[in-house]
Amino acid sequence: MCETCGCDDPAAAPRLTSFSADGEAAGCSGRELLLEQRVLAKNDEQAEQTRQWLAARSVLAVNLMSSPGSGKTTLLERTVRDLAGRWPLAVVEGDQESVRDAERIRAGGVPVVQVNTGRGCHLDADMVDRALRVLDPPADGVVFVENVGNLVCPALFDLGEGVRVVLTSVTEGEDKPLKYPHMFAQADLVLLTKCDLVPFLAVDVDRCIGLIRRINPAADVFTLAGLHLPAGVPGTEPEPGLAAWYAWLDARRRRPDARPRAAVAGRV
Amino acid sequence: MHELAITQSVVDAVVERTGPARVTAVRLVIGRRSGVVPESVRFCFDLVTAGTPLAGAALMIDEPAGRARCRRCAAEFVADDVLVLCGCGCADVAVDGGDDLRIASVSLVPTAAEAS
Ligand SMILES: Nc1nc2c(ncn2[C@@H]2O[C@H](COP(=O)(O)OP(=O)(O)OP(=O)(O)O)[C@@H](O)[C@H]2O)c(=O)[nH]1
Ligand SMILES: [Mg+2]
Ligand SMILES: [Zn+2]
Ligand SMILES: [Zn+2]
């Protein structure tokens, strides 16, 4: 009878892996140490510190997440071009390897720090903290954090951001919210991008928005189109979604709040 | 393999608490609504623990579901997904639990003093 590791419990048996012979023996006679600790406790502590640090400076941090290629950098290039004269802006670029996206943003004349995660598929709170200390963002501004293109892990890692924005492009199909509900469930805003391509696709935009609302009734949803085109191209202006995006940011910039993420998203 | 980062966080958190002591078993709680796939954590575990005090440890994963209550028809049922829908077709459902991502406990090789 072993209550410590449950090794004779038939229900638990299939759950045991990597049961080396001496590991099993030692497991049974070993001393159990209760930890009862959240797996991401360390990340979440750093994220809370970052959140307080940002709040003290009244800086809004925006965590931008999406699949690879949904248009995060394109949106940032455009946003930076339109807003740079109005508010202090800075950008943290997360990428596994290259500095391509940081170069694209720097061309817009805004301070940017590139974080290469190597094999890591997401940014964590520690990486963002270090980038923010380098950027030293001025008060009342906005820091955009472009996460690594991935709809899985970034949903789990709190960066200390004020708001979470999830992009999904119409070319990815309307089922993305159903396939990655965690990511969409935690968004404050969902941007449906590349809507200029709708006429060429068999995608049901209303259904996609309906799915987003079902998973996350509290999130705002805007559509964006033609952001890859240079500003002022006839037929693409005005872009109502872009104006809504700027107004949405401005409303949150005026009251960057320091509520812990747990209170915002109901996370444990 | 997105659970690699989670598994690495488990190992880091355990080693931080237990230091060089050899760990022979790890008990995790991965709720069904946590967004983490237990199978993938199991798959990564040997790889990530190799060369650490957790090498060769047994991994036990408890996978609790959440409890849901429909705000329209008051039905109560098990919630084992992020997307929760009541049998009555209603999505206005209050959910409790099932989103844990926790290290419950570890087993350590008894120290010389304890073994004697
Ligand atoms: N048609 C169309 N294409 C777009 C739009 N926005 C972005 N694109 C194109 O989509 C591709 C990917 O855009 P990026 O902005 O690099 O995407 P990203 O999300 O930053 O990609 P990663 O950083 O690699 O994850 C580029 O070829 C863009 O030109 C849009 O509104 N319409
Ligand atoms: Mg990019
Ligand atoms: Zn991942
Ligand atoms: Zn019901």
Image (cartoon, rainbow, N blue to C red):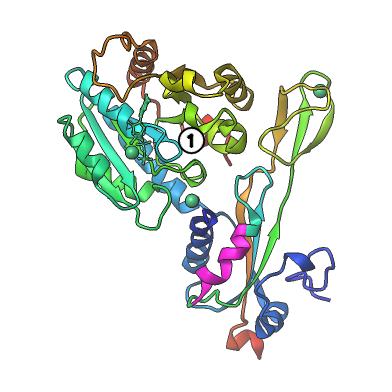
Residue ID for mark 1: A261
Q: Is residue B111 left or right of residue A104?
A: right
Q: Is residue B27 left or right of residue A194?
A: right
Quadrant of the drawing holding the C terminus of chain A: top right
Give the residue displayed 53% in from the left and 65% down from the top. B14
Q: Residues within 10 Å of mark 1 (few under 14, many from 20)?
A: many
Q: Position of residue B19 (x, y in %)?
A: 48, 73
Which residue is situated farthest in the bottom direction here? B116
Q: Is residue B11 above or below residue A22?
A: above
- Whether A108 is among the magenta residues is no
Secondary structure of the residue carrying numbered label 1: helix
Q: Is residue B113 left or right of residue A3?
A: left
Give the residue displayed 66% in from the left and 75% down from the top. A31
| Main SS class of the magenta portion in the image | helix
Residue B105 occupies quadrant:
bottom right
Quadrant of the drawing holding the N terminus of chain A: bottom right
Give the residue displayed 71% in from the left and 69% down from the top. A16
- Which residue type carries mark 1? Arg
Q: Is residue A201 visible?
A: yes
Q: Chain of mark 1?
A: A
Give the residue displayed 71% in from the left and 52% down from the top. B63
- Whether B49 is among the magenta residues is yes
Q: Is residue B9 above or below residue A55?
A: below
Residue A250 occupies quadrant:
top left
Q: Position of residue A266 (x, y in %)?
A: 58, 34
Magenta segment: B40-50
Residue in the foreground of this view, choosing between A114 and B70: A114
Q: Is residue B40 above or below residue A52?
A: below
